[in-house]
């Protein structure tokens, strides 16, 4: 228990800079957080993540106004997941979108691909994407994962279907669907969430034609952000249990036990 508390107390910082001669630098907002917020000192032990599967353990060797240099003493590497979870929600109002991105990233969703539907009531600007990417990077400090959630600029429904051609399982959250996801948790999955006011008929028809399966979480009408977080939680739960459970093909949303707990 004491050892666990010690490990939890080590602070984690994000750095996109490459490891050079067993040293990595911390700059920008993370440097401010390191120096001013955490009041770190030379010699302090910290963790550094790059968002690409690497976790470094080291000690602060240099602490300057523009840069901190960390000497790496050990590291861990994690392969990129072979199956991924993609959430494709309608673009929403800025505040709601920022919160949705934050929570999806904290849950460990692999990709967020916003969509601009006919009834989407928000305009997109490139500054939004930069904001979302910073939020996703900060989430790695909370969820202790090693891969950053990838976030893409919004696209049209047609562009989304073209980009998702190789994804095995495609879900369409829809009030006309069946309750519960027909999930094979060994596959990559994308879930589309519509805008306020629902899809227009042409958009629904396009998605169905491209192989998306209609489903609904329950009998309630949910906001875009609520639906996105709900389906993400369900899919992340399935993914976490992928070695213990599998989905019943005959009963969408039901599970059958295939192994004992480890």
Image (cartoon, grey):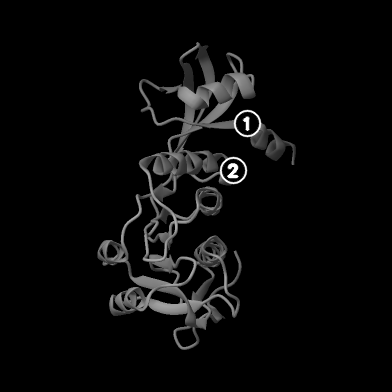
Q: Is residue 214 left or right of residue 208?
A: right
Q: Is residue 206 above or below residue 68?
A: below
Q: Is residue 24 above or below residue 151?
A: above
Residue 92: percent from left, percent from top: 48, 56
Residue corresponding to mark 2: 142
Residue corresponding to mark 1: 10
Residue 7: percent from left, percent from top: 64, 35
Asked whether the viewer can see residue 207, the reply is yes
Name which of mark 1 and mark 2 comes first in the sequence: 1
Residue 22: percent from left, percent from top: 41, 22
Q: Nearer the viewer, residue 211 or 168?
A: 211
Q: Which mark is residue 245?
A: none
Quadrant position of residue 156: bottom left
Mark 1 residue crowding within 10 angstroms, few (<14) / some (14–19) / many (20+): few
Asked whether the viewer can see residue 247, the reply is no
Q: Residue furthest bottom?
A: 250
């Amino acid at each position: 228990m004491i050892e666990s508390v010690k490990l939890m107390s080590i602070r984690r910082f994000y750095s996109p800079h490459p490891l050079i001669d067993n040293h990595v630098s911390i700059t920008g907002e993370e440097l401010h957080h390191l120096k001013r917020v955490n009041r770190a000192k030379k010699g302090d032990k910290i963790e550094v993540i790059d968002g690409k599967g690497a976790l470094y353990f080291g000690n602060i060797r240099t602490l300057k106004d523009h840069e901190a240099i960390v000497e790496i003493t050990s590291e861990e590497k994690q392969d990129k997941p072979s199956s991924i979870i993609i959430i494709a929600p309608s673009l929403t109002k800025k505040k709601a979108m920022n919160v949705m991105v934050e929570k999806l990233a904290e849950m460990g969703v692999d990709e967020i691909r916003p969509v601009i539907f006919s009834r989407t009531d928000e305009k997109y600007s490139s500054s939004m994407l930069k904001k979302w990417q910073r939020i996703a990077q900060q989430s790695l400090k909370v969820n202790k994962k090693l891969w950053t959630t990838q976030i893409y600029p919004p696209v049209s429904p047609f562009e989304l279907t073209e980009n998702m051609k190789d994804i095995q399982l495609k879900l369409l959250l829809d009030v006309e669907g069946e309750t519960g996801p027909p999930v094979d948790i060994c596959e990559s999955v994308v879930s589309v969430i519509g805008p306020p006011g629902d899809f227009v008929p042409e958009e629904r028809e396009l998605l169905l034609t491209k192989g998306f399966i209609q489903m609904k979480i329950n009998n309630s009408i949910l906001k875009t952000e609520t639906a996105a977080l709900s389906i993400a939680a369900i899919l992340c739960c399935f993914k976490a249990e992928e070695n213990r459970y599998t989905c019943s093909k005959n009963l969408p949303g039901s599970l059958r036990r295939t192994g004992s707990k480890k």
